[in-house]
Every structure is written in C-alpha cells, then in structure tokens.
Image (cartoon, rainbow, N blue to C red):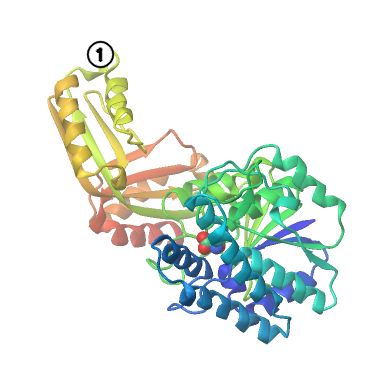
Amino acid sequence: MKVAKFGGSSVANAEQLKKVANIIQSDADRKIIVVSAPGKRNSDDIKVTDLLIDLGEAYRLGQSHEQELQRVVDRFEAILEELHLSKDVLHDIQTRVRKIFNDGNDLATKLDAIKAIGEDSLAKILSEYLVSLGMHARYVNPKEAGLILSDQPGSAQILDESFKLIHQLTKHDEIMVIPGFFGYTKEGKLVTFSRGGSDITGSIVAAGVKADLYENFTDVDSVYCVNPQIVKNPKEITSLTYKEMRELSYAGFSVFHAEALIPAFKERIPVCIKNTNNPGAKGTMIVNEKAETNQAVVGIASDTGFVSLYVSKYLMNREIGFGRRLLNILEDEGISFEHTPSGIDDLSVIIRENQLTEEKEAIVINRINKELKPDTVYIDRRLALIMIVGEGMHSFVGTAAKATKAFEEADVNLEMINQGSSEVSMMFGIKEEGVKRAVQSLYRVFFEEN
Ligand code: ASP
C-alpha cells in the first residue's frame, strides 16, 4: 500500500486536480491520499491557507470579513465549475465560518479551525471528483483517521496513541482522501500543525499504516544536489538516505522540512519525492540505507543568518565547568545554539541570528564578562554555513582537501570548519557575502570535475 501526499501546487486548480486523479487511477496501490489546500496557481497568486489567515485576521481586528471569505469561496467555486461537481461545499464553507466565529472557543482555536478549511474542503472535493470518475473513493476526516494531537493551536504535535488508530485504516479497501495539516485534541478540538503541515500528516499516516512507500508529490522532478537558484541546472539526486536528507535540509535545502519526515523515518518507510506535472520522472528516493556508492558527496546546502559568539581565555581547557557556565547563560536567556566548535583556549557558539536580538546580545556579553572573566568576548554577525553531505564521505580520502581547494578557488575565507561529530557531513562557516561563489565552486569541484 502506498500513501500519496499532494502539495499545494498539485491541487491549485481543476487542471492540477485532473493530473492528481490520473496519478491515483494509474496505480491501484495508491490507497491513501493526503492533500494540502490549493496553493499558488502562478507566482503572483495567494495560497488558500493565506486567504484563510487573512479572513481570521479580519475577524480578530473586528473588521468586516465578507470580502476575505468571498475570495476563499471563489477559489473553490472555480475548481467545482471546471470539474462539473455540485457546489454544496461552498455553502458548507460559509456556514462553517459563521459557526466558528460565533462559537465560544478562544481566539487561537477559532483561527486554527478557519485555517483547516482549505485542506478539508479540498479533500471533500477531490474524493467527490474521484467518485465522479468511477473510482471507489471517500473523504476521511482526520478524527476518523485517528490523528490525535497535542493541544497547541498552530503548532500541534502528534500523540503516540494515534499510530495504532491510524493503522485501522488498512482494514478498508476504498481510496481514502484525508485532509492534511490538522487533527483533533483528545477533547475533540480541531488544531493544526505548523505551516507546511500537510507533509507532517502524510508522513504520520504512512507510518501509521506501515505503508510500503510514502510518495510526496510536488512540482519538481527530483531533489537537486544544490540550490538551483545558485547553480543553473544542477544534477538531480536519485537516491538519498534519511541522514543525508536531514543534514541537507538543516542547512536550507528547500524541498521540504526533514522534521516532517520523522514519523516515516522511524518506521523506515521509504519516501519518494515525485512531480505531479511529470509523474513519469523517477523522482528522488529517500531510504534508510544505500548500497555502497562511488560518490563522496551527494549534496551541498547553505544557509545564512548565523552569528558566532566567540569567547577566549588563557588556560580555558583547565577551567572545569567553563563551557557549562557559558551555555547556562544562553539557557537562562532562552537562546538555543547550533554548534560549538572549540580550541584549547577558545570556544565559539554558533547561534541563529533570530535568537540573539541586540538587547539579548548586550545582556549575554555583560554576563559573560562578569561571570566568566574571559580575555576576549565578541560577536560576529552575518555568517553563513555551508554543508557538504554524503554517507560515502567517510570512506573517501581527500574530501576535505577538495572542499578547501574549492573555497580557495572562490577566494572565500574560511571562518570555521566542523567535521567529526557527524559522519555524513562537513560544515564550513564563512561570511555571508561569499556564499554564492563558494557554493558554485564546491559544485564544480564535487560534481563537474572528473
Ligand atoms: N496549507 C498549509 C500551509 O500552507 C499546509 C500545507 O500546505 O502543507 O501551510
């Protein structure tokens, strides 16, 4: 059995839904379908979820919200007309919105209920459409599917007991269309995952039914080994391990968030990323283990917006508890850190810029000076991290040499190198302005030479 998840661009309009129906029809193993809300039809368009957020916002501000509601209804109406389906769903949306705004729930709960209308309506429409094409399909609400979530509106988490319930879906043999992005608390309150959460639903359902394959349909043929906005027509990755995917997506790889895949990874369900607009393309497989490869590096990722907090003190290596006290200060200020490369007398803590406001920076520096009495402490902003990733790396000689040569050729100074804690990646810290040049040069060295 396969679980197939279709993202926002795959369900953006009637034409896309026809492709989705063809994909479902072409493989009898595609039994469980998870859908997003309609996304953008072109680059200037607005996602239905964003229209719903606007609707909630107008309500929150006490403004009239007829226009916002109409925009949502119009999106669905256009789809229904082209697919020759009944317009009952439109009436449902209007009554539902009215009901949500008038119920006694708190604001966060109301806003979640509004946001979920996109996925929910689309799942109903798609199942009706499949039936109209003669398929044996039905809409399954996440409550019926067994998605029980924590009571955290807007960022709910799946509860462990869900998986057993979800497994019951395997008893049915029709095609089941489940809306992504939301579930219900134990008390029966609707709550959503964080944005992009349909991927989370897909992965949870795949894990729950122990699918043979979790297919994630999007709008690219495959995952590329480097950001196509930095390198033109980069090579495609045909196969990737979970670990490689995690490392790449940490550093800004955009196909999707690795966290969303954790439930599928835990159950070792293979994941395939495929293109709704070109379903014949092989896509990228993400698997637990890969056969031996002749390739050290599978991908290069980069992300900006880091700062380095540098502390040095003579004989730091002998001062017991120095590191702990430093990290304690960060903990007290509610700052999470990413890496801590260290020397004998120095320690840097790499932090995401959004964690360290100027106000917090002053407090932290002040406390470090007072409590740790360092020789030097300063903050370096506008740093970028570049990761080269590949399970094959540990068995190849000279990967680091090749990488540093690439930085040299790009005339980019290395602020930091970190290898060792992870067997599958090497991380380099540089100034933000050098990122593009460095990534292009790394691509040349690892993917174009030889
Ligand atoms: N529709 C939701 C969003 O735009 C969830 C998703 O598409 O995955 O964030």
Ligand 1 is found in which quarter of the picture?
Answer: bottom right
Q: Residue at x 17, y 32 (%)?
A: 365
Horizontal placement of 314 versus 437: left or right? left
Dot 1 surroundings within 10 Å: few (below 14), some, or many (20 or more)?
few
| Mark 1, residue position | 318
Q: Measuring 43% from the left and 56% from the top, which residue is drawn there? A: 446
* 257 over 436 or under it: above or below: above
Question: Where does the image place residue 231, in percent across and percent down from the top left?
Answer: 39, 67
Residue 392, image x and y in percent? 53, 45
Q: Is residue 397 visible?
A: no
Q: Is ligand 1 closer than 8 angstroms to the Cβ of mark 1?
A: no
As drawn, is 86 to the left or to the right of 400?
A: right
Q: How many marks?
A: 1
Which one is nearer the viewer's eye here, 4 or 399?
A: 4
Front residue of 278/3: it is 3
Would residue 330 appear left or right of 265 to someone viewing this image?
left
Vertical side of 408 occupied by 228: above or below: below
Q: In x, y percent, where is residue 170?
A: 83, 51
Q: Position of residue 293 (x, y in %)?
A: 59, 49
Can you see residue 336?
yes
Circle 1 SS class: helix
Front position in the image: 131 or 244: 131
Image quadrant containing the N terminus = bottom right
Amino acid at circle 1: Arg
Front in this rendered view, residue 188 or 183 = 188
- Asked where in the image residue 342 lies, by quadrant, the reply is top left
Please report the residue visible at 57 percent of the width from the left and 77 percent of the height from the top. Answer: 73
